[in-house]
Image: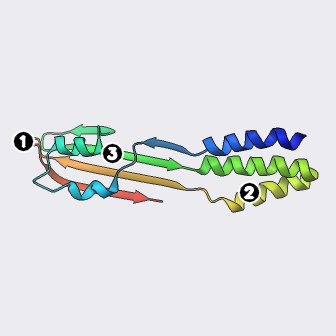
Amino acid sequence: MKFISVFPLAALLLITACSTSGTKIQTDKLSSIQRGVTTEQEVIATFGKPDSTTTTLDRKVLTYSYQENNSTEKSVIASTGSILGGMAGGAIGSLAGSLAANSAVPGKVNLEILTVEIDPETGKVTNYQFQQTQ
């Protein structure tokens, strides 16, 4: 009976364990940005409101960022494996369940950053850069 009460909790934790912040950058739309042609308003219409805007005398920089992190998910899976292993085989089972879950799910962070430089006089893109790390 104890197994039945743990599984819904484990499933709920696994579903909600991945954390994200920002708005996913639509990489298929990056080709719409053209230096000296695309305006600031067109960038905003395409990618939405930037996460941050920095303005100096010679440029304005729009920054879009998105982060997805499943290291929380890995921790939850390891804990769940430990609990289930412990119920099945005591302390040894708990350790084995935790180790098995930890090795089965690699922690992963996906980071995307789009920076768009705008000429304040013309309102057009002077440069842009997209970076993605995994």
Mark 3 element type: strand
Question: Residue 23: which numbered mark, if any?
Answer: none
On the picture, is 64 further left or further right than 125?
right
Where residue 128 appears, x then y in whole percent?
23, 54
Mark 1 element type: loop
Q: Quadrant of the N terminus?
A: top right
Residue at numbered disc 2: 101
Q: Work out how far the residue at label 1 is from the one at label 3, CA to CA, in angstroms.
A: 22 Å
- Say what amino acid the circle numbered 2 marks: Ala
- Say what amino acid the circle numbered 3 marks: Tyr
Q: Work out how far the residue at label 1 is from the one at label 2, CA to CA, in angstroms.
A: 56 Å
In the image, residue 106 sits, relative to residue 122, either above or below, namely: below
Q: Nearer the viewer, residue 39 or 96?
A: 39
Question: Along the polypeptide, which appears first: circle 3 or circle 2?
Answer: 3
Residue at numbered disc 1: 121
Where residue 76 appears, x then y in whole percent?
69, 46
Q: Residue at x 60, y 56 (%)?
A: 107
- Say what amino acid the circle numbered 1 marks: Glu
